[in-house]
Image (cartoon, rainbow, N blue to C red):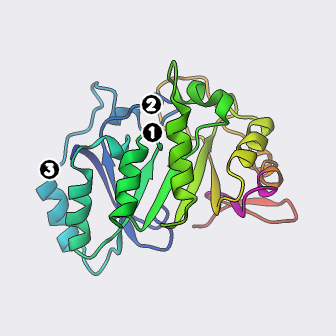
Amino acid sequence: MKILGLQKTTLLDFPGQVACTIFTGGCNFRCPFCHNSELFVPGEETPEEYTEEEIFSFLRKRKGVLTGVAITGGEPTLQPDLMDFIRKVRDLGYLIKLDTNGYKPEVTEEIIKEKLADYIAMDIKSCRENYAKVAGTDSIDLSRIERSVNLLMERRVPYEFRTTVVKELHSKDDFAKIAEWLDGADAYFLQSFTDTGHVLKSGFSAYTQAEMAEFLPVLRKHIRSVHLRGIDYDEDKTVTESEA
């Protein structure tokens, strides 16, 4: 496993669990707004790689404090030894959350089949028409994304879909199309773009909280549970920063 980051404690990354987050290196997308570009673009800011022994030493020490491990990236499903790594983590008694962009459905399917994940979060970059543009690729085999969507909607593992919303790349019409595409999905989260200083390209900005909230009724026509991540939204249209 190529591991380039470790967040030692999080209450947000793995719903319902006190977890740590492991960041893998490498990604097959080049989303221009990506805030973790240092994980897959070689340069002066590339983090030092963790050894697996360093990770497992940490996990052994944190048993009884942490309950889960979130594996994110980059794109974890590109790691050839991902499943072996997950098995070792589970042997320590931890629950596993996997983040994925969904472009390797064969890996996701095997992980579900082997019951190696307790929760899966899949990024939905945009509606079908704009997917390649938002993913930062010249072309994309959308059938791979659709296969991953369908796998999760079989409900063999708890899951969520999520979109990082960028003002210059997403519109209300895009979310209307996404809602129809994900019709019947269990959970969908919108999270606001944040410029961390590591984004691939400049010139992007976030919607206001009130503007983000306007997308919710459109999505709720087709999706059971839709929320703004990190923002508390009241049905009377008030939006306040989450205290989570």
In the image, 108 versus 239, the foreground residue is 108
SS of the residue under disc 3: loop
| Secondary structure at numbered mark 2 | loop
Q: Amino acid at mark 3?
A: Thr
Report the side of 144 relative to 88 (left or right): right
Q: What amino acid is at disc 2?
A: Phe
Region of the chain picked out in magenta, as a range: 219-229
Q: CA distance from mark 2 to mark 1?
A: 9 Å
Is there a contact, CB below 8 Å, between mark 2 and mark 1?
yes
- Three-letter code, disc 1: Tyr
- Label 3 environment density (alpha carbons within 10 Å; few <14, some 14–19, many ≥20): few
From what the image shows, is residue 19 above or below residue 44? below
Q: Residue at label 2?
A: 29
Q: Describe the element under mark 1 as helix, strand or loop.
A: loop
Residue under numbered circle 1: 103
Residue that numbered label 3 is attached to: 51
Viewer-side residue, 76 vs 141: 141
Q: Is residue 57 magenta?
A: no
Q: Which mark is residue 193?
A: none
Picture residue at 58% right of the left edge, 43% below the top:
124
Place of residue 131 in the rendered image (x, y in percent of width and height, measured from the top left): 60, 31
Query: Considering the image in quadrants, where does the C terminus appear?
Result: bottom right
Residue at 79% across, 39% down:
172
